[in-house]
Amino acid sequence: MNVASAGNIAHGVEVVVIDAGHGGKFPGAHYGGVYEKDLTLKVALKLGKLVEEGMPGVKVVYTRTADRTLGADLAADLQARADIANKAGGDLFISIHANAAPRATGVRGVETLIMGESSKEQRYNENALFENNREDLIDMSDERTAAIVRAYIQNLQFTYGEYSMAFARCIQNSYLKAGRHSRGIKPQLLRVLYATDMPGVLTEIGFMSNQQELAYMKSDRGQNEIARSLYQAIRNYSAYVLGTRMAEEEQAAAAKPAAEQPAEKSAGKAAEKSVEKPAAKSAEKTAAAQPAEGKTATAAPVRTPEKPAVQPLRYTIQVMASASSVPLASAQFRAYRGKVKEYAAEGRFPYKYGVGEYGTREAAQRKLAEVRKVFPGAFVVACRGTQIVK
């Protein structure tokens, strides 16, 4: 009996970044002598241990493993978390938080947030989240900032957006199976998700302002159950990504010309055809193929179709997405006019425009800060040739 080694187990994700929300001088919500920063860290560490033990070969990266601050102010702290995730080349980002509703202590349940803007926020941005989470939001009161963020969301929707939503669904379904009350999936303008270049979510594991939920979250049993729900969600999401990747590879293989099919298949088909031919016809064809008397037979050259080379996976910094082609010399590209490359992708905005191409995600990340001075909504995407790939 052959048993595959642990390192050979295939996963759809290779690097999972776990972010314990708050920490240090940014404690988050505080109820009944319990701080949000402590709850999130305990759940994060339990979750990481489950992934390491249950998904061999998957690397776990923590934004913090102790009660500490990552930046001088909140904006720097949130950016530092994203920087850790980006530097690690994360395939998935999960930020763990606890909710609070000071004026409605009966409110309960779990919810998962993805990067986006709801219609409510477009009208009343200042009331988008409960008071203790207000500082985590991007301020959309400035028109220039709002325009930049909305352009980013538009680009995000056709790269990491669908994967973030898939992961959010996995989390909420996992919560439901554990008997938690689901408050659903909501788009929010979260700074930490804006700065991470990978599929990501922020999940609220319960309401600290609700006495029953606070007791559950601070108990060892509750923390273990929450961590187990999140772990199962990561497993389900990983299987989803792996299945999607395999389906795409099968479709690509099926679309190859017959000449590119394996030789043994071609040989088998040829043998089948030769068996089906009547003897009389074979004889006639053999006679017809003989050269006329006195003439020398010249073998016709056999042309072997050239197999197209597979383009290497590279990374570019996407600065724009459009429903129609934009001239590369357009003034819309500002300082990068004439320096961008057009890529193709699926969706309502099939024309993508990127600055530079790099062999690794880390190399692209190093250039990202410079590009964001011109295009603040820019982010890193993978590409092959002139195609954006997910």
Image (tube, rainbow, N blue to C red):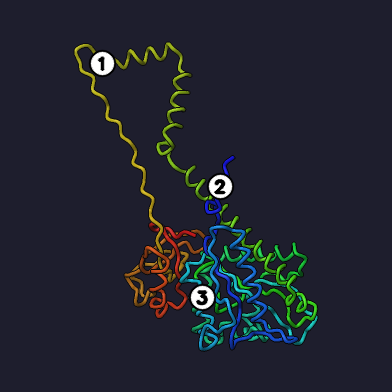
Q: Which residue corresponds to mark 1?
A: 291
Q: CA distance from mark 2 to mark 1?
A: 58 Å
Q: Do the numbered discs 2 and 3 sit on residues whose CB atoms are within 8 Å? A: no
Q: Is residue 8 above or below residue 254?
A: below
Which amino acid type corresponds to the residue marked 2 in the rendered image?
Answer: Ala
> Can the viewer see residue 140 in this picture?
no
Foreground tag (2 vs 1): 2
Which amino acid type corresponds to the residue marked 1 in the rendered image?
Answer: Pro
230 vs 315, nearest the viewer: 230
Q: CA distance from mark 2 to mark 3?
A: 35 Å
Q: Which residue corresponds to mark 3?
A: 82
Q: Is residue 275 above or below residue 49?
A: above
Mark 3 closeness class: few <14, some 14–19, many ≥20 residues within 10 Å: many
* Mark 1 or mark 3, earlier in chain: 3
**Is residue 261 found left or right of 238 in the rendered image?**
left
Residue drawn at 76 percent across, 70 percent down: 181
Q: Which residue corresponds to mark 2?
A: 4
Mark 2 closeness class: few <14, some 14–19, many ≥20 residues within 10 Å: few
Q: Do the numbered discs 1 and 3 sit on residues whose CB atoms are within 8 Å? A: no
Which amino acid type corresponds to the residue marked 3 in the rendered image?
Answer: Ala
**Is residue 193 found left or right of 213 in the rendered image?**
left
